[in-house]
């Protein structure tokens, strides 16, 4: 947990005050921390993540069932998968700066664990599970609706940015496009990549990320926002 990022600050951000604060602490504790501190293995977030995953699946299924009454089961399943996949949850976690609240071991800290999608998405589910255990289904549902199932149009655009951009440029506009690595900086264990995406002779967007893929996704998202402003329409669920 970084300086200034306290339990009380996280409670303020999520709009929920725990009766049993140890649940929230557990939800923020990575196994690397419990190993270094020689804490019982059940003191990390993994069991809460398991529970939160089930709560999230039920809540998102209920949401889609009511919001898309004419959509068949197969499409609903695809929609749910895109909303609760690892990159999607990591995107939501970054809105809360959740990574800065996690208790990590030194090794994981030094290799960029706070920004790793796999970790912060797991913690997002663990926090969901902790809220469910502490207050029941309703506050858990409120948390999910506020931080995961909100602003879905822009989130879906981000989740599927690379495939959407490819479909638009190559499929509809019949033009060539490509990504260019502009910069690679930082130590080997914590590199930062800067990428641009081009359509013929125009730069459509730039992105920065801990991996080339993440940087390309960010660049593609910025390109889609630019093209949307020009009046292009993307696929919708």
Image (spheres, rainbow, N blue to C red):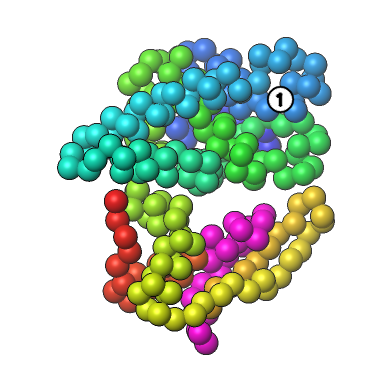
**Residue 15 screen position, x and y as percent:** 41, 30
Q: Residue at x 77, y 31 (%)?
A: 105
Q: Residue at x 43, y 74 (%)?
A: 170
Residue position for label 1: 31
Query: What is the secondary structure assignment of the residue under circle 1?
Result: helix
Q: For the residue carrying disc 1, how many other residues have a C-alpha within 10 Å: few (<14), some (14-19), or many (20+)?
A: many
User: With respect to residue 222, does 134 lie above or below?
Assistant: above
In front: 165, or 136?
A: 165
**Residue 189 screen position, x and y as percent:** 80, 50
Q: Along the horizontal axis of the image, is 102 left or right of 71? A: right
**Residue 26 screen position, x and y as percent:** 61, 20
Per the rendered image, the range of residues in magenta is 199-219
* Residue 4 visible in the current orientation: no
**Residue 102 screen position, x and y as percent:** 64, 32
Tally the marks: 1
In this view, the residue farthest toward the left is 70
Residue 122 among those drawn in magenta: no
Residue 217 among those drawn in magenta: yes
Q: Residue at x 80, y 16 (%)?
A: 38
Q: Check the picture and name the quadrant holding the N terminus.
A: top right
Q: Along the horizontal axis of the image, is 49 left or right of 84? A: right
User: With respect to residue 214, does 75 lie above or below?
Assistant: above
Q: Residue at x 63, y 74 (%)?
A: 180
* Residue 57 visible in the current orientation: yes
In this view, the residue farthest toward the bottom is 201
Q: Along the horizontal axis of the image, is 72 left or right of 21? A: left
- The quadrant holding residue 121 is top right
In front: 236, or 103?
A: 236
User: With respect to residue 81, does 21 lie above or below?
Assistant: above
């Amino acid at each position: 947990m970084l300086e200034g990022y306290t339990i009380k600050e996280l409670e303020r951000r999520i709009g929920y005050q725990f009766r049993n604060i140890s649940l929230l602490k557990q939800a923020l504790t990575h196994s690397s921390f419990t190993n270094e501190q020689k804490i019982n293995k059940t003191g990390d977030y993994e069991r809460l993540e398991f529970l939160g995953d089930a709560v999230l699946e039920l809540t998102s299924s209920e949401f889609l069932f009511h919001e898309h009454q004419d959509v068949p089961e197969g499409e609903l399943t695809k929609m749910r998968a895109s909303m609760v996949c690892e990159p999607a949850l990591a995107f939501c976690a970054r809105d809360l700066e959740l990574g800065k609240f996690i208790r990590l071991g030194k090794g994981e800290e030094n290799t960029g664990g706070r920004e790793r999608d796999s970790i912060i998405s797991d913690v997002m589910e663990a926090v969901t599970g902790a809220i469910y255990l502490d207050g029941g289904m309703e506050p858990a549902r409120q948390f999910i609706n506020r931080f995961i199932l909100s602003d879905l149009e822009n989130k879906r655009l981000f989740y599927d940015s690379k495939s959407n951009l490819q479909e638009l440029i190559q499929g509809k506009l019949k033009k060539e496009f490509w990504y260019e690595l502009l910069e690679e900086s930082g130590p080997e264990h914590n590199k930062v990549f800067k990428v641009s995406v081009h359509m013929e002779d125009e730069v459509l967007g730039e992105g920065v990320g801990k991996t080339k893929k993440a940087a390309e996704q960010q660049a593609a998202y910025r390109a889609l926002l630019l093209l949307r402003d020009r009046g292009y329409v993307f696929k919708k669920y």
